[in-house]
Image (cartoon, rainbow, N blue to C red):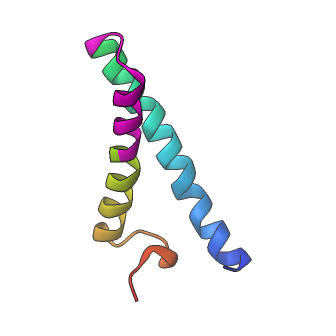
Amino acid sequence: MDREQLIELVPHYVAMLILAFLTLAVVSVAVGEIGFWIEVALIVVVVFGYRLVVVRLGVGPSVWESP
């Protein structure tokens, strides 16, 4: 992995992190206290869902594109 690929990935990882925190905040406000494992499951869904959606929309980094 070269420097250009890393630079291309950084905004997507930052967006995933922000989206994960926002999702946890919204669920916490809507539902109240949730368990640790539910939080982990939500983060996993957000991370993998983000990647699938971004690649399908064609705006994902070239590293995520299948060969």
Q: Residue furthest front?
A: 37
Q: Residue furthest bottom?
A: 67
At a point 43% along the width and 30% down the height, the residue shown is 22
Count of residue discs:
0
**Residue 46 falls inside the magenta stretch:** no
Q: Position of residue 42 (x, y in %)?
A: 34, 36
**Position of 50 compared to 1: left or right?**
left
At a point 36% along the width and 11% down the height, the residue shown is 33
At a point 43% along the width and 40% down the height, the residue shown is 19
Q: Position of residue 26 (x, y in %)?
A: 34, 23
**Residue 36 falls inside the magenta stretch:** yes
State the residue in front, 59 or 53. Answer: 53
Q: Residue furthest top?
A: 32
Q: Residue furthest right?
A: 3
**Position of 8 compared to 33: left or right?**
right
At a point 34% along the width and 29% down the height, the residue shown is 38
Magenta segment, which residues?
31-44
Image quadrant where one finds the C terminus: bottom left
Above or below for 56 versus 62: above
State which quadrant residue 39 falls in: top left
Q: Position of residue 15 (x, y in %)?
A: 50, 48
Above or below for 4 versus 40: below
